[in-house]
Each structure stands twice: as structure tokens, then as C-alpha cells.
């Protein structure tokens, strides 16, 4: 368009040309990088989605994107007796939700104590929580296995092979990072609210359950979500505790499903992956501004 | 990498609340008291059940611990005041059992030979050896049998060839009984307080009943009764005999097995009886890790790769994230929200699935990357040691850059615009402004996040295990180690791997080593970040 010059004056096209170049140097190249990154970020996800809609079943058949749209894989997923996908899905949701709820509750109790009360050992307690977290639970996987085996001899309901036992292990990590996140948020709630309620005759439990917990709801949601995502993706401990396919989670079940025969049941796996990812991603995107706020709150001092 | 919510970031010093709740001594409400008592009684009921079971098993140490904890918990909640403890106890209990105890217990296991065929006491081992070596005595007389049940435990009611009636179970040697009922053939078939199993019950519990061995007497060398069919029992004798005085086993050929000192009975020729038992072996596991050539070599290369993987993961994701944050940190640019939303998708995608999805994409023969992007090439992305390392880092970049992008964007936007303006007025070029002013400031706020990200990747099990399983495997190694194994996947494979046998002791020794490495790195880097903070 720059070569076509029908106007009597040459000023306008030159300005326009310079304008386009200027635009590119100023902003346009950013869009170029943006588009490259979009492809990089989204391609694997689109690929899985496409594979899940492909009836061929195999890996090689999944290499043409979105040629066919067929929901057969999603139907078949729920009909395999050896791979109880529906049970895995339900287990993951239940374990994730129970562990998240427990984590939020235990963390909130501790954060309330640290934020509102002054007692001997408070600073040491906060510091200890940081130090203990340096030893990730995953490192103690052998000890956890043997501990649960031992507990199972007394309480078979929470031993190896039980989901309740797994949830209890997850709750072992309820304090720590979560308490810190909540503690910071609790501190932003004015203490005068507590005091007003106290003067009105409310007990500490009443203040905690009916006033504070409502005021800190956003951070409870964030901690709950982070903990839900973490537990529903957790593989190591789940894989040694949950031994029976009927009790396993998606992480354990889908791994074994795809690890044995990657190429032949690929599209089924893809359908399973899409279904497994949807709730987590939807929650994440819905709450993303809180999560990002929580993550960066510390970094943006 | 997925979400490492930064420990240090959240640990910003709190504004101390102006006033604080004092532990109140006012009488609590009736409703509160009732709830407390209700919850406590449920907990106590469970505890009493546990105490009862532990008492029966004669596990005195756990018994003492459970008793002490129960008493303390009751005391905390029934006593007025001491408010912080009421709020902290539930979380601390879980922390104590599943974090602190687990750390201590790992330390203990690292000093034992716990593992396959070494997971019980010596007495259990002797009993199991005798039981598994039992064979039916040829021409053994048939004992006429009725199987009884009491509270879920099976009992043998036998009428021996001389007509004497005896009762016994797996834990209780045969002893004469009286008061039994007999059927028309003179066989004892019922006993007060016990349920006689019907034919259907026998069929339904066939496996448990055929496995049951009822000792003839307290001396295990006398043998035991077993039943192949539920109606006749025969005498089974062990081919091995145990002599408690000399602590040896002797088999029918006269070979003697002695306690070899490392948790098993061994013959002079080196044959070992299975199972052995757990003993404390001191620093043997650590010595093994450092001195056995075919373990030390892989362990060193795995350690180096663990560091390389963690450092490179942080470096690549941070570089890309920062670059994108700068690129998109332009207020007038359109469509930023869309870019941002799509770019954080890998971060929102469940971590364990990402590894598996890329496993398919990287497949050497059928994967999209080789088939479509490289036109049918057969590049061994996951089976060549170096390409596998590259692939793992590449996938981790895909997973981790959105996180870095988000925190860098946040950090960049918090740097006051005036600084840039002032520098520009002083004649600084944009690059100089970035390098000398913005970048150091940005580093101050993201450094703690980079350290926690390093610590996270140091133990980033999922991505390695899902994508390569640690492979390609080093076939010369004495443990199941491969080119992309990091320390934590090595621990998992040594402890729970298939094929090589489980060695909990060695795995825990590795875990303890990792703990020291991570702790050292964290402490050093926390100090470093303090230096950085003084810059501010």
C-alpha cells in the first residue's frame, strides 16, 4: 500500500508508513511474541482435546488435529471394568475436597491463634513451621508407608489402602505454608472488630466462627483451592497408600493406564485427561485473581 | 513445576495487632461446653479403642504415647483458659505425627536394613520360616475336624485318632476341651460360645482356612495341623527345625543355618533363609551409598543432575517469564488480558497430566513432534540420555514459565515509575535503566520466590516420573537409576520400585542426604536474600 501513491501530497503515506513501522517497533513485535507464546502454551492442550475427540484410539492417529469430532472416547471411558474412571474421578474429588476443607480448618485455627493471641513460644512456633516445611512430605514417603502399615494394625480403617489414611497424611501438611498465607490475611482484619464483639459478650469461639471466618473468606478460598489442586495432583504418597484400583485417584489411575501402553489407548487417556483437567482449570481461572494476589502479595512488598 | 506458594514471601513481618485477646477466664456458654464434651467423648472413645488394641498387641511404647496424648488433649480442652493451645492443638497433632515423627522415623529407618524380606522381628521371622517350610507328613493320621468361629477368628475343633477332642487356633496351640457336642459319627462338631462353620462358610473362606496352621504344642518343632478340605486335618512338620539354645536352624539334610549378624539365617555355604528380620545396621546404608562403586557412581551423577535440573529449571522459566513480563508490561498494548489468560493455561493444567501429555507428544515412533513437526524423523527424545534431559527441561519450561511471568509482572508493576523517569532525565538509556535499577529491585522481591522454586524443583517428582520415569536407565548401576533421575525419584524407585526389590533402609538414607542438601541450600540462600534485602 505504500507504493500506491495517488494523492498529490506525499506527506500522508510517509506518515502512515512511518506510523506502521513505529507501531511495530513500539507494540507490534510484542504481539508477534505474544502469538508465538500462545501457540507454545496452548498447543499441547489443543492436541489433547483433539486426540480425545478422535475415535482411532492410537497415538499416531491423533496427529491430525480436529479432523474428526467424536465423543465415543468419553463414553467408553466409563465402561472399562479394569479402569474404573468414574471411581477415580469421584475419589479424587472426595479426597481433594475433604483434604482441602480439613487443611483450611486446621490452618485457620492456627492462623487465628498466631494472629490474635500473644503467648510464649509464638515466634518460635512460627519459625518452627517454616523449618519443618523444609523437609517435604514426599521425602518421608518410606516412613509414611511404614507408619500407616503400623497404624493399620490397630485401626484398619486408616491403614494402608484406605483413603481416610491418605487424607490424614495430607492433613499433616495443613500447617506451614497455608498458615503463613492465612496469618498474613488475618492480620489485615482490624482487631477492633474482635474487641467490639467481645464487649458485646461473644465468646472466643463465637468470634472465630461467626465473625472472623466470614471476613477472611477470600483467603480461605485461595488456600482451599491451592490445597485441592495440590492434593488432586499428588502422586507419590497416593500411589503407595492406595493399592486397590477402586480406591485410587486420577493421578495414580491415569498414570498406570497410560504408562503401560502409551500408544494404543492414547485417545482414551486424552478423554480422561480432558475431563480431569476441566474442573481444576475452571476453578483456577475463576479464582485466578485471588491466587495471583496471594502469590505475589509477598513479592510486591 | 506447579505451584510453590512461597514460604518466604508470605512471611512478611506482620503488623502487630493493636490489642490482643487475653486468655479469657469467663465461664463459657452451655452450648460451647456441650460441643466440647461431645467432640472430646468421640475422640476419647476412639482413643480407648486404640489403647485396647495396643494393649492386646502388647505394643507398650505406642500405648504410652496414645495414652499421654489423650490425657493432654482432654486436659487442654477441659481446663478453662490457655486459649492458644485450644486453637493450635488440632493442627499440631497432625504436624507432629505426619511431619515431625515422619522425619525422625525416616532417620531411624536409614539406620536399619528394613526392606524386602527384612520387615519384622526375629521371632516373627523364625515363626514364618517354620511355617513356610511345613510339609504334610507322609502317612500322617487324619484328625477329624470341625472349623469354629469366634469373633472372626477361626478355631480347629479336632477329634484325634484316639478319640480325644482338642481345640486350637493359629495363636493358641491345641489343648483338650470339654463340653463339646458330637455328631452321629462321634466327631466333635460344636462348642458353646463358638459358631460352627457351615459348608457354605467353608467354601466362602477357603483361602483363609487352608492357610491356617494350628500348632500342636508350644514347641514349633512339633509341627502343626492344617486342613486341605475343612473336614480332615493332617499333621504338617517343618523341614527345618529350630534350636533355641544354639539359635540355629537345621534342615533335613543336616545343613545348619546360623544368625549371620545382618538380619538373616545363613548357612556356611551362604544360602539365606527367607524372611530375615529388621536390625539396626548403623551407618551401613550411608557407607553403601558412598563406597559401593555401582551405587556411588550413579548417586553422584544423579546428584549433579538434580542440581543442574533445579538450577536450569529456575533459570529458564525465570528468563522466559521475565522476558514476557517486560514485553507485556506496556499499558497501551491491546489484548493483554487474552494473552495472559492463555499463557497461564499450562500453569492451571494439572501437573501430573502435563508429563503424560508430553510423553505422547515426544513419543519416538508415533508422537506429534517427530511425525508432524520433524516430518517423520525418529528422534529419541526420551530414550537418549542427553535429549531426555533436554526434553525434561523443555517440558518444565512449558509448565513453569506462567508462574514466573505472573510474579515478574507483579514485581515490575510495583516498581515506582518515578525511578525510571528520574534515571531517564539523568540520561540513562532504557537498557541501563533496566539493568541497573529495575532488575536489582525486581530481584529483591522475587529472590525468595526463586529460592522456593529451586527447592520445589529439587524435589519435582511428578514431571520426571511421568515423562521419563527417570530413564533411560543406566544398566551398569547397582540401583535403578537413569539419566534423568533426580534424587527423589531415586528414593521412590529404591523404596517401591519393581524388579530390584524394596530397600527401605537405603532409600531413607538417600532421603536423609537430600534433606541435608536442601536444608543447607535453603539456609545459605536465606542468608543471601537478607543481603539482597539490605540493598533496598
Image (tube, rainbow, N blue to C red):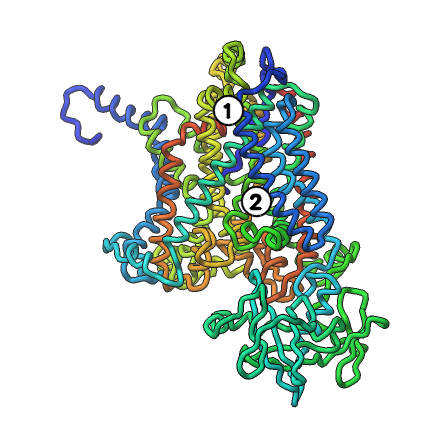
Residue B451 in the image: above or below residue B515: above
Mark 1 chain: B
Q: Residue at x 54, y 42 (%)?
A: A170
Residue B226's place in the image compared with B111, above or below, is below
Q: Which mark is residue B31?
A: 1
* Frontmost residue, B402 versus B308: B402
In which quadrant of the rendered view does residue B338 lie?
A: top left
Image location of residue A244, percent across then percent down: 48, 59
Residue at x 38%, y 51% (from the top left corner): A273
Q: Secondary structure at mark 1?
A: helix
The numbered mark at residue A169 is: 2
Q: Chain of mark 2?
A: A
Image coords of residue B136 (percent x, y): 64, 83
The residue nearer to you, when weighing B465 against B71, is B71
The quarter of the rendered structure image containing the C terminus of chain B is top right
Residue B234, position in %: x, y?
Answer: 63, 82
Horizontal arrangement in the rendering, residue A214 relative to residue B443 (left or right): left
Is residue A227 among the parts visible in the rendering? yes
- In the depicted view, which residue is nearer to us: B308 or A119? A119
Q: Is B515 left, or right, of A50 in this rendering?
A: right
User: Quadrant of the rendered structure where residue B137 is?
Assistant: bottom right
Residue B195, placed above or below residue A205: below
Amino acid at each position: 500500500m505504500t507504493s500506491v501513491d495517488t494523492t498529490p501530497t506525499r506527506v500522508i503515506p510517509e506518515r502512515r508508513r512511518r506510523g506502521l513501522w513505529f507501531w511495530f517497533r513500539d507494540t507490534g513485535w510484542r504481539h508477534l511474541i505474544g502469538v508465538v507464546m500462545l501457540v507454545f502454551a496452548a498447543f499441547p492442550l489443543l492436541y489433547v482435546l483433539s486426540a480425545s475427540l478422535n475415535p482411532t484410539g492410537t497415538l499416531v492417529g491423533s496427529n491430525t488435529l480436529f479432523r474428526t469430532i467424536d465423543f465415543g472416547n468419553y463414553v467408553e471411558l466409563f465402561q472399562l471394568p479394569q479402569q474404573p474412571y468414574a471411581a477415580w474421578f469421584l475419589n479424587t474429588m472426595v479426597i481433594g475436597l475433604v483434604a482441602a476443607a480439613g487443611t483450611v480448618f486446621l490452618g485457620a485455627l492456627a492462623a487465628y491463634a498466631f494472629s490474635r493471641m500473644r503467648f510464649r513460644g509464638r515466634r518460635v512456633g512460627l519459625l518452627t513451621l517454616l523449618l519443618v516445611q523444609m523437609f517435604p512430605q514426599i521425602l518421608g514417603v518410606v516412613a509414611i508407608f511404614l507408619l500407616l502399615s503400623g497404624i493399620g494394625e490397630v485401626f484398619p480403617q486408616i491403614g494402608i489402602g484406605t483413603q481416610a489414611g491418605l487424607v490424614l497424611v495430607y492433613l499433616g501438611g495443613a500447617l506451614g505454608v497455608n498458615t503463613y498465607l492465612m496469618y498474613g490475611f488475618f492480620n489485615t482484619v482490624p482487631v477492633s472488630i474482635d474487641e467490639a464483639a467481645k464487649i458485646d459478650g461473644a465468646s472466643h469461639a463465637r468470634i472465630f466462627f461467626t465473625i472472623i471466618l466470614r471476613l477472611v473468606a477470600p483467603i480461605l478460598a485461595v488456600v482451599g483451592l491451592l490445597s485441592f489442586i495440590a492434593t488432586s495432583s499428588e502422586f507419590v504418597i497416593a500411589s503407595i497408600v492406595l493399592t486397590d484400583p477402586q480406591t485410587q485417584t486420577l493421578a495414580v489411575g491415569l498414570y498406570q493406564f497410560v504408562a503401560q501402553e502409551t500408544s494404543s489407548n492414547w485417545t482414551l487417556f486424552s478423554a480422561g485427561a480432558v475431563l480431569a483437567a476441566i474442573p481444576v482449570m475452571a476453578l483456577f481461572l475463576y479464582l485466578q485473581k485471588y491466587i495471583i494476589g496471594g502469590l505475589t502479595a509477598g513479592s510486591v512488598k | 513445576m506447579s505451584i510453590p506458594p512461597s514460604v518466604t514471601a508470605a512471611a512478611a513481618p506482620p503488623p502487630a495487632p493493636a490489642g490482643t485477646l487475653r486468655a479469657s477466664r469467663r465461664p463459657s456458654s452451655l452450648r460451647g461446653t456441650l460441643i466440647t464434651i461431645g467432640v472430646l467423648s468421640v475422640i476419647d472413645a476412639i482413643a480407648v479403642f486404640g489403647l485396647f488394641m495396643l494393649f492386646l498387641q502388647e505394643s507398650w511404647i505406642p500405648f504410652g504415647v496414645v495414652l499421654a496424648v489423650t490425657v493432654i488433649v482432654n486436659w487442654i480442652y477441659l481446663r478453662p483458659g490457655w486459649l492458644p493451645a485450644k486453637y493450635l492443638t488440632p493442627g499440631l497433632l497432625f504436624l507432629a505425627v505426619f511431619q515431625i515423627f515422619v522425619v525422625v522415623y525416616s532417620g531411624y529407618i536409614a539406620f536399619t536394613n528394613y526392606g524386602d524380606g527384612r520387615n519384622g522381628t526375629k521371632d516373627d521371622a523364625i515363626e514364618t520360616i517354620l511355617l513356610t517350610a511345613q510339609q504334610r507328613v507322609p502317612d500322617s493320621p487324619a484328625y477329624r475336624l470341625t472349623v469354629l468361629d469366634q469373633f472372626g477368628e477361626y478355631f480347629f475343633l479336632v477329634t484325634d485318632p484316639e478319640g480325644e477332642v482338642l481345640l486350637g487356633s493359629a495363636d493358641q496351640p491345641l489343648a483338650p476341651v470339654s463340653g463339646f457336642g458330637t455328631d452321629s459319627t462321634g466327631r466333635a462338631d460344636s462348642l458353646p460360645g463358638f459358631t460352627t462353620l457351615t459348608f457354605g462358610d467353608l467354601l466362602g473362606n477357603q483361602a483363609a482356612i487352608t492357610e491356617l496352621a494350628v500348632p500342636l504344642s508350644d514347641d514349633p518343632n512339633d509341627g502343626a495341623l492344617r486342613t486341605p478340605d475343612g473336614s480332615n486335618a493332617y499333621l504338617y512338620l517343618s523341614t527345618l527345625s529350630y534350636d533355641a539354645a544354639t539359635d540355629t536352624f537345621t534342615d533335613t539334610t543336616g545343613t545348619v543355618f546360623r544368625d549371620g549378624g545382618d538380619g538373616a539365617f545363613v548357612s556356611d555355604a551362604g544360602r539365606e533363609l527367607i524372611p530375615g528380620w529388621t536390625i539396626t545396621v548403623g551407618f551401613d546404608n550411608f557407607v553403601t551409598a558412598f563406597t559401593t562403586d555401582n551405587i556411588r557412581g550413579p548417586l553422584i551423577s544423579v546428584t549433579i543432575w538434580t542440581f543442574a535440573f533445579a538450577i536450569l529449571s529456575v533459570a529458564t522459566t525465570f528468563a522466559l517469564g521475565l522476558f514476557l513480563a517486560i514485553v507485556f508490561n506496556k499499558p497501551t498494548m491491546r489484548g493483554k488480558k487474552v494473552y495472559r489468560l492463555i499463557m497461564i493455561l499450562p500453569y492451571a493444567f494439572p501437573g501430573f497430566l502435563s508429563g503424560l501429555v508430553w510423553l505422547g507428544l515426544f513419543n519416538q515412533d508415533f508422537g506429534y513432534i517427530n511425525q508432524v513437526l520433524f516430518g517423520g524423523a525418529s528422534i529419541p527424545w526420551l530414550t537418549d540420555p542427553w535429549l531426555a534431559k533436554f526434553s525434561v527441561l523443555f517440558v518444565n519450561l512449558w509448565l513453569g514459565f506462567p508462574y514466573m511471568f505472573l510474579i515478574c509482572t507483579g514485581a515490575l508493576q510495583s516498581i515506582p515509575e518515578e525511578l525510571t523517569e528520574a534515571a531517564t532525565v539523568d540520561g540513562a538509556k532504557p537498557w541501563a535503566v533496566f539493568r541497573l535499577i529495575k532488575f536489582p529491585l525486581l530481584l529483591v522481591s522475587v529472590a525468595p520466590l526463586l529460592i522456593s522454586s529451586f527447592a520445589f524443583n529439587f524435589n519435582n517428582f511428578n514431571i520426571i516420573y511421568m515423562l521419563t520415569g527417570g530413564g533411560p536407565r543406566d544398566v551398569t548401576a547397582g540401583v535403578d537409576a537413569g539419566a534423568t533421575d533426580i534424587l527423589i525419584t531415586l528414593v521412590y524407585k529404591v523404596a517401591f520400585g519393581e524388579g530390584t526389590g524394596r530397600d527401605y533402609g537405603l532409600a531413607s538414607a538417600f532421603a536423609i542426604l537430600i534433606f541435608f542438601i536442601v536444608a543447607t541450600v535453603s539456609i545459605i540462600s536465606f542468608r543471601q536474600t537478607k543481603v539482597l534485602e539490605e540493598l533496598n
